[in-house]
Amino acid sequence: MKINSKDFRVRPGQTVKLQEWPTLVKPFFKSHKRYQELLEKHVARLSKLQRPHWATNRYASLLIFQGMDAAGKDGAIQHVMSGVNPQGCHVFSFTQPTADEMEHDFLWRNTRRLPERGHIGRITPRLMRNA
C-alpha cells in the first residue's frame, strides 16, 4: 500500500476551494479480503513491536488520527490498535482549540501530549465543522 501525500497537500498561501477537491479516494485495495489480510499483518507487527519498544524504554511512538466528525477515526483506531496492549498506551482527544492553544502553532498542543519513552500515544483531534 502506497499513499502519495502530495495528493492531499496544500501549498502555503494556496486558496482552498473544497468543491474542487475530490471527496472520494481511489481504493487502495483490490478486495475487502486483501484489506483484511494486510490489516491483520500490520496489527500483528505493531503488537510484536510493542513489547521490545516498551522494554528498551528508549523511544516512543505517536499516532495522530485527524478528521471531521463521523470521518471514521474511531473505526480506524479500533482496527489499528486492536493488537496493542492498552497498558502501554496513552490516549488524548482534542476538541475545539482554546484561546491559549490558538496563540501557539498548530502542533503545540500535540507536542504537550507526547508519550513517555516506551509508550504509544494516540491523539485524536476532532475537526469541528464550525471551528
Image (spheres, grey):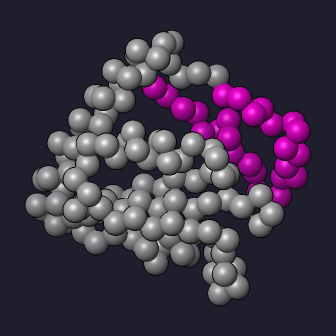
Q: Position of residue 62 (x, y in %)?
A: 39, 59
**Does any portion of residue 59 appear in the rendered image?**
no
The residue drawn where x is 83% and y is 58% is 13
Q: Residue 48: x and y, percent?
A: 17, 42
Q: Nearer the viewer, residue 80 or 45?
A: 80
Query: Is 118 positioned to the left or the right of 67 in the image?
Result: left
At 43% across and 74% down in the image, what residue appears? 113
- Percent across and percent down for residue 109 are 54, 75
Q: Which residues are magenta?
A: 1-25
Tell me which residue sits at (57%, 42%) in the image. Answer: 72
51 above or below 125? above
> In this view of the protein, can residue 93 be seen by the observer?
yes
Left or right of 27: which side holds 16? right
Residue 10 drawn above or below residue 20: below
Position above or below: 130 against 80: below
Give the answer, above or below, for where 2 lies relative to 13: above
Using residue 29 as the reference point, say whether residue 70 is left or right of it.
Answer: right
Image quarter of residue 131: bottom right
